[in-house]
Image (spheres, helix red, strand yellow):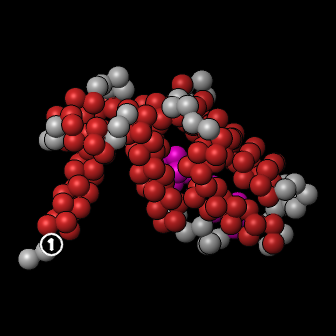
């Protein structure tokens, strides 16, 4: 029989996962829903929600962490080491956009949570790392120009991907046109051969 402490930890993990699952569904459907609605959907008490996430902001940041993990897994599944670097980069960005696209309202809400530059940097670090590796591969293979700093190219790639997503979500630029503009902009920025 497992020790009681291990059972409590397992129960706590299950509760936390249930809360995050419920919060993702509830807050994506109704961004202003209260934590009571999240608790009801998770099948736990409000006190349990607050025990894991003392504030709405902490809950949103935990959801952001989970969505980042899902995004990174999708990017890894996009086979970033195969084929031309430009194609690999677009596959990474498409995989990231597909993950974020499943929860557009929630992603916008999370983006509005005020965090410091360090937290924002850390949140994007796993995504940035994958983009960096593809850009470096493209540079070392002669596909991409090497005149601009890699860090700048990574930051600009993320910013352009966010801009394309926002333009698509608001309807200012239709989806296909936003993707085409993103690809053309990135290829120019990277000095793709």
Quadrant position of the N terminus in the picture: bottom left
Q: Secondary structure at mark 1?
A: loop
Give how far across and how far down residue 6 sits, in percent. 20, 68
| Identity of the residue drawn at 34% across and 41% down | 53
Give above or below for 143 relative to 120: below
Name the residue that disc number 1 marks.
3
Q: Is residue 21 left or right of residue 1?
A: right
Frontmost residue, 176 versus 9: 9
Please give the name of the residue rendered at 81% of the width and 66% of the height, measured from the top-left corner: 139
Q: Is residue 91 magenta?
A: yes
* Residue 56 placement, left or right of 162: left
Is the residue marked by circle 1 packed among few (<14), some (14-19), or many (20+) residues within 10 Å? few
Check if residue 193 falls in the magenta segment. Answer: no
Quadrant including the C terminus: bottom right
In this image, 32 relative to 108: left or right?
left
The residue lying furthest to the left in this view is 1
- Above or below, 3 against 160 in this view is below
Res. 180 in view: no
- Report whether 166 appears left or right of 39: right
Residue at (64% x, 61% y) in the render: 129
Q: Which residues are magenta?
A: 84-98
Q: Main secondary structure of the magenta part?
A: helix
Can you name the residue that lies furthest to the right here? 147
52 or 144, which is in the foreground? 52
Q: Position of residue 26 (x, y in %)?
A: 28, 33
Residue drawn 28% across the image and 38% down it = 50
Q: How many marks?
A: 1
Residue 32 is drawn in which quadrant? top left
- Percent across and percent down for residue 155 are 72, 48
Q: Is residue 151 visible?
A: yes
Image: 150 above or below 170? below
């Amino acid at each position: 029989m497992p020790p009681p402490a291990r059972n409590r930890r397992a129960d706590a993990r299950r509760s936390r996962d249930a809360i995050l699952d419920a919060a993702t569904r509830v807050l994506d459907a109704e961004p202003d829903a209260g934590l009571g609605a999240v608790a009801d959907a998770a099948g736990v008490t409000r006190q349990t929600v607050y025990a894991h996430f003392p504030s709405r902001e902490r809950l949103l940041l935990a959801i952001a962490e989970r969505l980042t993990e899902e995004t990174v897994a999708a990017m890894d599944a996009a086979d970033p080491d195969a084929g031309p670097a430009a194609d690999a980069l677009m596959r990474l960005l498409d995989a990231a956009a597909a993950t974020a696209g499943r929860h557009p309202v929630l992603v916008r809400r999370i983006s509005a949570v005020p965090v410091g530059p360090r937290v924002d940097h850390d949140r994007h670090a796993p995504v940035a790392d994958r983009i960096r590796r593809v850009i470096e591969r493209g540079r070392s293979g002669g596909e991409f120009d090497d005149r601009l700093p890699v860090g700048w190219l990574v930051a600009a790639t993320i910013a352009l991907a966010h801009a394309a997503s926002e333009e698509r979500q608001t309807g200012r630029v239709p989806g296909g046109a936003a993707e085409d503009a993103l690809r053309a902009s990135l290829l120019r920025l990277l000095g793709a051969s």
